[in-house]
Image (cartoon, rainbow, N blue to C red):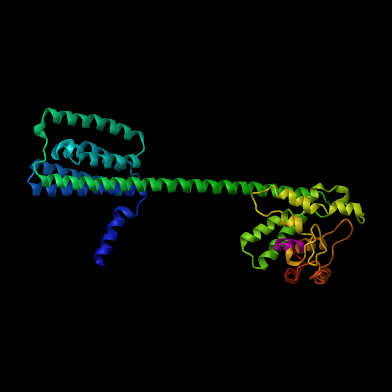
Amino acid sequence: MKFRKFTKKLYDSLIGRFELWQQMLNIAVIIAIVGAGASVIISMILGNSVIAILAFLLCALLGVICLLVSLRMKDITIAAVLYSVVSNFVLFPVMFFTSGGYHGGMPLWLLLGLVITWIVIKKKILYVIYVLSLIFQCGCILYSEAHPEMVVQFDSERTIAFDVVQSLILVSLILALIIKYMGYAYEKKKKELDEANALLAKMNERITLQAMYTLAKTIDAKDKYTNGHSMRVAKYSSMLARKMGFDEVKVEEIYNMALLHDIGKIGVPDEIINKTSSLTDEEFYVMKKHPKTGYDILSEMSEIKDLGIGARWHHERYDGRGYPDGLKGEEIPLQARIICVADAYDAMTSNRSYRSSMSQDKVKTEIIEGRGTQFDPGIADVMLEIIDEDKEFELHG
């Protein structure tokens, strides 16, 4: 248990608490340190030269320095550049001249350094380092061809076996790092795309809402007696929905539906809307078209789903005698039943071209009489509760 806690603490301090890019850099440096340390031990067991052993110790020390720089600095570019320089200009020649030249595991260590620094740095300095390192490494190879005695060749099957195992381990690590990077890059790109789409959708919705408010004001302006009607119906509808236990997302949806419930009136002539006497049959026929007209208009606003429900069905009656579709009871969408009550309340408490506003008591009587006929009984009861709580008749203010 103590060992597990120790290893977890060690992992968190060296790798776990960092972003993926720094994790990969730290892993690469730790691999280099461990590899150099293992090479020291192997070289001692095989009786290699003191120079080779000291060279591997130097690589391990430089690796530790790279790791410390990475751990202590927020910007890991410096640590990545340092590791790139160490792996290309120090680790390369050490591995090359002490492990059989280009027949040894050296190219794999080099590849590991290249992969990590390419992923982490991604800056112009990377290209400068690798152009210089390519020239340097070509020089090492040409020098070894002219002076073969400077290269420690494999002289036993055991040495070759160690090198093969080392190479396999390194290949596995390199592939694992590349796969992890590609997976992370895909997830990061997907997340960025999702965030961009969400932001775009939010912007579209904001623009749509602004257009809705403008339309609502335009509709209300057609009727000089009921200016502000749409905003008030939206307010009452959201109060009803909230008191009925709807969550805030649903409350907002109903608010938006109610805000544009009368948008179809944009196609009704002003003289009909502002007429002070009763409408003729022909005029009432024109007026009855506004729910369907409103629904058709709002159906084009696909950014907000089901926005036209209130517009089409807020004049339906619970007893089935409403319009435009003659729906009855729960056939009428719940949102429309809520807006119907809110719309009726505002109509009764507002001055109209053909009558003055009603008193609160008269409004309560009308709602009670309309339970089960014009209004959904349950929603009517909720409206009555709201009216009872409004002791000073401030709701309509």
Which SS type dominates the magenta stretch? Answer: helix
In the rendered view, does 133 fall on the left or right side of 220? left
The front one of 70 and 394 is 70
Q: Quadrant of residue 277?
A: bottom right
The front one of 236 and 378 is 378
Q: Give the quarter of the figure containing the C terminus.
A: bottom right
In the rendered image, residue 184, in percent from the top left (x then y), is placed at: 40, 48
In the rendered image, residue 188, in percent from the top left (x then y), is placed at: 44, 47
Provide the residue span drawn in magenta. 332-340
Residue lying furthest front? 157
- Residue 353 lies, with reference to residue 84, above or below; the image says below
In the rendered view, does 22 fall on the left or right side of 259? left
- Residue 211 lies, with reference to residue 7, above or below; the image says above
Q: Is residue 165 magenta?
A: no
Q: Give the quarter of the figure containing the N terminus.
A: bottom left
In the rendered image, residue 127, in percent from the top left (x then y), is placed at: 32, 32
In the rendered image, residue 75, in percent from the top left (x then y), is placed at: 35, 44
The front one of 97 and 165 is 165
Number of numbered callouts drawn? 0
Residue 263 visible in the displayed image: no
The front one of 165 and 233 is 165
